[in-house]
Image (tube, rainbow, N blue to C red):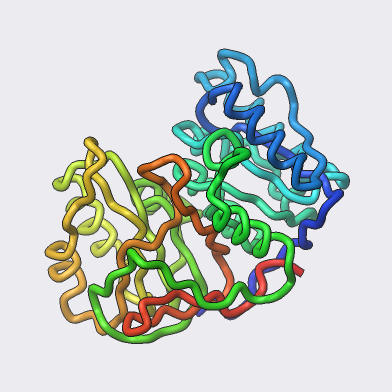
Amino acid sequence: MQKIAPIKPGRLVKGDTIGIVAPSSSFDRDNFKKGVAMLRSLGYAVKYERSIFNACWSKPGHNKQRALQINRMFADTQVKAIFCAKAGTGSAEIIPYLDKKIIRNNPKIFVGYSDITVILLYLQKIANMVVFHGPIVSDEIYHDMNQLTLEYLQALCGQAKPLGELKVLQLIAFRQGRASGRLAGGNLSLIVEAMDLPYRVATRGCILFLEDINESFETMQQYFVRLRRAGIFKKIAGLVFGKITDPAGKEHDIRGIVDEIFKGYNIPILYGFPSGHLQLRGGLHITLPFGVLATIDSEALSLTIDEAAVT
């Protein structure tokens, strides 16, 4: 387990400003406006740069501009939290232009998932920050969003106390046991992509979370083999899966892969935790704070967030 506790950002309260960045793909402008309106209706001020609407924003040649926008949001003392407009592709290309000094000197709530996993890993590595695997503005955040999705997001970002035990009906146990450690992880394919980079996921003593969509069964198998060979699973305390689906949206039966890859591993394993990609609009998306202590209990079918994610 990591010896130095991660830095927790300050909590987000009504009246605070949320900065929105677009480090990845372009997004639906109407959905974005709905997300912004929802955040404002909750009592937050919202700030974003209009350049994110440019048609060429997410195309090659604009990597530095997308990174500089994030640097400015971290440097802006008015901004208390940073949400992402969209995931998709392109986050990895902006990493060389992010300013480590600015980020380290201004730790803030940073929320995103999928392709944003790369940025979450980077922030954890260079600034030892707690980061948030949670909803994006142009997708899960809107007026009729799942109420529990909203409640968990607000509780984690706005309350300096542990979220507590999380039980959801779809959870199933692949391996029995109970273990505690710091939460880590994100999107499976992005975790694999970052294996050979300086900001690869740190897994010693952790509760590892993995989810992914639109990948063939063969590709999934290759991902798990590569992670095992790289030693990613060697020191983990427990494993929690989100959904793992094929290009048609059907969930893969990964129990056989798990039995083979984790043969000889005496760790609890749960499958089906609702964080990350959703199959249906309005589905439950529970924000996970990577870097905080958590407990997995496969007999109780629960994941417990044991400490506050903010101060």
Does residue 221 sit above or below 36 in this rendering? below
From the viewer's side, name the closer residue of 73 and 62.
73
* Residue 296 against residue 47 in the figure, above or below: below
Q: Residue at x 72, y 50 (%)?
A: 103
Q: Position of residue 261 (x, y in %)?
A: 18, 67
Name the spot of residue 239 as percent of width and height, x first. Answer: 35, 71
Q: Is residue 196 visible?
A: no
User: x, y percentage for residue 44?
Assistant: 80, 45
- Left/right placement of residue 181 relative to residue 169 reads right
Residue in the foreground of this view, choosing between 89 and 214: 214
The image quadrant of residue 168 is: bottom left
Residue 266 lies left or right of residue 23; in this view the side is left
176 vs 122: above or below: below
Residue drawn 67% across and 58% down?
154
203 or 148: nearer the eye?
148
Residue 203: quarter of image: bottom left
Q: Is residue 300 visible?
A: yes
Q: Is residue 83 above or below residue 69?
A: below
